[in-house]
Amino acid sequence: MEKNSSQSNNGSTPQESNILPAAGDLDKILQAAVSPKGELTPQQQDALEGVIEKIASKQPGIVAQAVIRQEMFSGPIPHPQILNGYDEKTRAQILEMAAKEQTHTHEMRKAGLSGEIKKDRRGQTFGLVIAVTGLLTAGWVAQYSTVAASIIGSLDLVAMVAIFAAPRAFEMMMAARAQKAQEEQRTPPKKPAAKPKRK
């Protein structure tokens, strides 16, 4: 009987006393929550939740404010706080690996761009040789047959247009399609108008 009366005097049940941590434990929980890492163990999270629920039940007028800190980081090297957790030699190795990776990426991009430029120059050179050869052939054949020379010259001009102008027009068309597709992805799809029901 004395135990029941002491519990009723405190105003707490055995379950509530299990939820609430001791004052020293509460200080540790609060310090862990405001530390730079802000990490709580599952037991500390449960204890903190119990304290908040207890306070909210006794004083419902108290406004609880929660602050969530989220940090996003991406890059070739780890976040500075994580990087500082490594010893000096490991940090140097990580930075060296990141520098090598970046150098490799730049070299690959440069090689790809250089290859594209060389391919375009080679195509232009071959196209010029073919065009000049066709015109020279048309000029030589013109001595014997003007009809054959005009056909060869016309085919040569059509081939030059196909070699030089058509790829550029195709690239512009593909770029326009890609841009249109990007714009369609940005804008939400329109809902079709509801059709009236037939009776």
Image (cartoon, rainbow, N blue to C red):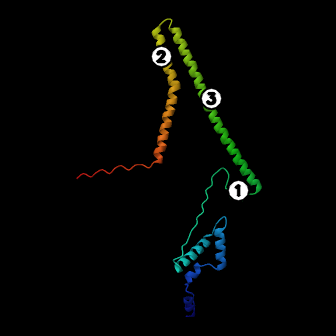
- Residue drawn at (47%, 12%), measured in percent from left and top? 150
Q: Residue furthest left?
A: 199
Which element is circle 3 on?
helix
Residue 144 % position (x, y) = 49, 5
Say which amino acid is labelled 3.
Lys
The residue under label 3 is: 118
Q: Please state if 57 lies on the left or on the right of 104 as rendered.
A: left
The residue under label 1 is: 83
- Looking at the image, residue 24 lies above or below residue 11: above
**Residue at mark 2 to residue at mark 1: CA–CA distance:** 68 Å
Q: Residue furthest top?
A: 144
Whichever of labels 3 and 1 marks the residue nearer the N terminus, that label is: 1
Say which amino acid is labelled 1.
Leu
Please tell me the numbered disc located at residue 154.
Answer: 2
> Are discs 3 and 1 less than 8 Å apart at CB?
no
Say which amino acid is labelled 2.
Ser
- Residue drawn at (64%, 51%), measured in percent from left and top? 75
- Residue drawn at (47%, 38%), measured in percent from left and top? 177
Whichever of labels 2 and 1 marks the residue nearer the N terminus, that label is: 1
Residue 51 % position (x, y) = 58, 76
Classed neighbour count for the residue bearing mark 2: other residues with Cα under 10 Å, few (<14), some (14–19), many (≥20)? some
- Residue drawn at (45%, 45%), measured in percent from left and top? 184
Which element is circle 2 on?
helix
